[in-house]
Image (cartoon, rainbow, N blue to C red):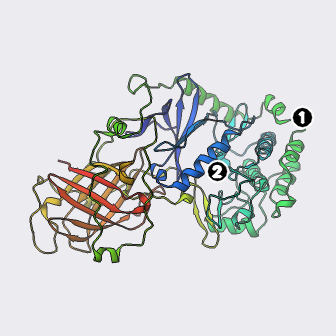
Amino acid sequence: MRPLEAGEPTVIGPYRLLGRLGSGGMGRVYLGRSEGGRTVAVKIVHPHFALDEEFRARFRNEVEAARLVGGDWTAPVLDADPEAAVPWVATGYAAGPSLTEAVREGAPLPAHSVRVLGAGLAEALAHVHGLGLVHRDVKPSNVLLTLDGPRLIDFGIARATDGTASLTATGVSVGSPGYMAPEQILGKGVTGAADVFSLGAVLVYGATGQPPFPGDSSAALLYKVVHEEPELGALRGDVRVLAAACLAKDPAARPAPEELARRLAPEGAARLVAAGWLPGPVVERVSRSAVRLLDLDTGAGDAPSGPVAFDKAAVGGAFGPPDPSYASLPADAPSPADAEEAPALSAPPPPRPPGKLSVSVAATSAPEGPNGRGRKVSCTVALAVAGALAAVTVGTMFVLGMLSKDEPLNGSRDRNDQPPAATGAPRPTETAAGKVPEAYLGKWSGKAAASGGTIPLGTFEVTLRQAKPGERVGTVVQHDLIGNTCKDVLTLTSASPEELVATGKGAASNGTQCAQTTHTVHLRPDGKNLTYTSEDPDAGDPRARLSRVE
């Protein structure tokens, strides 16, 4: 667990956040504590996904499905708000490392531990499948090792098997390369047998420290899963036989979870767990983590004690003074010349009344220093629903990881990004042809919103320098509401005292939470301020009112 960084939320709904457990393409996961003292894991999705109606519909359905899951070997869903401006879900916290962490930091599990692991997960899948659900993403990082047995987590992409409509695109499969079943990769019908295949791969990893289909690229992993036999390494005895059966290419040839559980633990996994199932080093690690958890300071004296409504007033209270100009910024159509160069984009989503997100935020983010080691960010936002999950598009083998390893937030900055000295903010005056009027130059900052002001996007920082058309004129850095950052590079199209027009594109250094799509940015003087508008319907046409940073 990592401590909360400046700008990250400290309260979500009724839960006070104590630290960050992880992050990835879908959002961030925090350790939280309820008013009654219960420890929970809270997943907050990236704010830009709130702009996508399809994502909201799927998230709502998946939360409802996950609420049904409450077996002995799973982490139950306790609370959620799919309708919030930034949706979130809270689950029971399982004190223990993931299988990935335990193996990476220690060694493969002993044979007895692997047997208990397989029996517990098989019982969990039997329970899940009995509810008409398929987990679809059984992998080592979604398996936690606790003193009370293994826990299968992250049912955020489970889906009812009797559903009549798929909320994922045709030809797209959800899962993780190397642990997905062949039928998932090929875009065929997915049943509970796909989870059994993944369980077999997890058993191999737990016993050998290596996946059954090793490879150094997603394409290689996917090819091996479909066309090659698994590598079972040092796996021995009946566990080897069962793992091989689980990894059969034909779904019909794989054993049912009930059969697996019975063969691994005839008297039930609970009896094996009660006798002690984890190796000493893992038990020691879990014990140390439990002690640290008890000692955690909730910081009750430093943060609000109650929930904060995520409306404009809350934006003012948590993220700075409210800006009434969110919904009143001009939305002029692009000039014919600009329209010809702009990419074709779909119509913007209809505005939605702001939901409720109980949130307050840690101390204000520190500005970038002279060495360029501040946090980066982008003003464009990724809205592809598949980006929220580990998705594979058959044919192009396009793979996006869910809750992957943290993307680095710090990094070196182009020395040319340093803003010129502040020059005040008089109204622009004409300068030499093809150059940027002096009044635009410098660094600007302000609150941003999308969809007519109903979706807060955090803070935009715009840095502008002298340039000619076709040259890099500056950057836009976005700090969103849960601590993520993205950066756009601006290429000058035209500049006049009335308007500066540029083409924005995501920087190559951005993480997976940031979009790389091209869009048109307009900056217009407004007294001593600048108004920022972006022609980016998929991102809700972001707007901001910027003030000069002295």
Q: Is residue 323 left or right of residue 230?
A: left
Front residue (pair 100, 323): 323
Residue located at (28% from left, 45% from top): 367
Q: Is residue 360 left or right of residue 191?
A: left
Residue located at (44% from left, 61% from top): 538
Front residue (pair 149, 135): 135
Residue located at (58% from left, 29% from top): 39
The answer to whether residue 500 shows anywhere in this view is: yes
Q: Is residue 396 left or right of residue 446?
A: right
Residue identifier under label 1: 267
The answer to whether residue 101 shows anywhere in this view is: no
Residue identifier under label 2: 157
Disc on the earlier residue, 2 or 1: 2
Front residue (pair 329, 528): 329
Q: Answer with the quarter of the image where residue 293 lies.
A: top right
User: Tag 1's secondary structure?
Assistant: loop
User: Tag 2's secondary structure?
Assistant: loop
Residue kind at label 1, given as amino acid type: Glu
Front residue (pair 483, 231): 483
Residue kind at label 2, given as amino acid type: Ile
Above or below 444: residue 398: below
Q: Residues within 10 Å of mark 2 (few under 14, many from 20)?
A: many
| Image position, residue 353 (x, y; %) | 43, 45
| Image position, residue 309 (x, y; %) | 42, 35
Q: Residues within 10 Å of mark 1 (few under 14, many from 20)?
A: few
Alpha-carbon span between mark 2 and mark 1? 31 Å
Q: Answer with the quarter of the image where residue 358 lies.
A: top left
